[in-house]
Amino acid sequence: MDVVTAVPTPPRSEAAGSARTGRLSLAVALLSGALGAAVALLATRQQWSEGTVTVAGGPFPLTARGSDVTGVPAALAVVGLAALVAVFAVRRAGRLAVAGLLALSGAGIVAAALLGASDRSALNEQAAKASGDTSATVEALSHTAWPYVAAAGGALLLLAGLLALRYGWLWPAMSGRYERGGAAARPRRKQAARVDPDRPEDLWKALDRGEDPTGA
C-alpha cells in the first residue's frame, strides 16, 4: 500500500523580510539624517543666550547666537549630511566606516550643544568689548531652548548613523556598470558603408568618416 506523505509548507521567505527591513531602515535613516542636519544648522543661527553688562549709560543688552558660542554643531552637521550621501557610494568596509562617521557626527553635535547650553564665555567677550574693561563679565545671564534643539538634531543624525551601521548591508549602492571598462562599455562601431569608387560623393563621405575609400 502506498503511503502518502504530506509536503511541509515552506517557511516565510527570509529574503522578503530582509528586503522590507532594508527599505524601512533606509527610509527612516534618510529622513532622520536629513532632518537632523537641517535642524542642527538652523539652531546654530538662533539666539542661545542673553544678558547685560554695566556701562556708563547703564545696563547694555548682549545676545549670543549658537555660532557665537561654538562652531562645532554646524560643522558636524555638514559632515554628517555628506556622510549620509556617501553611504550609498561605498560598500562593505567603506560603508561601515562612513556610517561610523555619520554616527560620530551626530554624537559630537549632541555633546557640543549640551556644553554650549550653559556657556557664558561668548557673552563675557562681548561684555569686555562693550565696556572697555577686560575684566567685565555678563550679568543677568539666561539661555534659550535652542541649544537643546541642536542637540535633538544631533540625536537624529546619530540615529541615522546607527541604522546605517546595523542595516547598511541591506541598502542599495550606486550602480557600478559605468565603472566597467572594455569593449562591453563602449558602443560598437558601425560597419563601414560600402563605397562606390565611381561615385565622387561616396568617396567624400568616406573621407569625412575617416575611412579609406580605396579599401586598402
Image: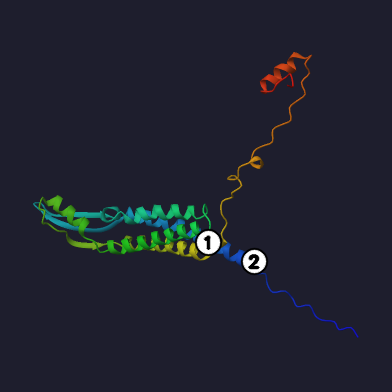
Q: Can you say whether 134 is above or below 214 in the image?
A: below
Label 1 crowd bin: few (<14), some (14–19), many (20+), radius 10 Å: many
Circle number at residue 43: none
Q: Quadrant of the N terminus?
A: bottom right
Q: Residue furthest right?
A: 1
Circle number at residue 168: 1
Instruction: Report helix, strand or loop for mark 1.
Output: helix
173 or 108: which is nearer to us?
A: 173
- Quarter of the view holding residue 73: bottom left
Report x, y in % for residue 199.
77, 14
208 or 65: which is nearer to us?
A: 208
Report x, y in % for residue 3.
86, 84
Q: Amino acid at mark 2?
A: Ala
Q: Residue at x 58, y 66 (%)?
A: 21
Q: Amino acid at mark 1?
A: Gly
Looking at the image, is mark 2 or mark 1 earlier in the sequence?
Answer: 2
Q: Residue furthest bottom?
A: 1
Picture mark count: 2
39 or 197: which is nearer to us?
A: 197
- Quarter of the view holding residue 209: top right
Circle number at residue 15: 2
Q: Residue at x 33, y 60 (%)?
A: 146
Report x, y in % for residue 130.
14, 50
Q: Quadrant of the C terminus?
A: top right
50 vs 109, left or right, is left
Instruction: Report helix, strand or loop for mark 2.
Output: helix
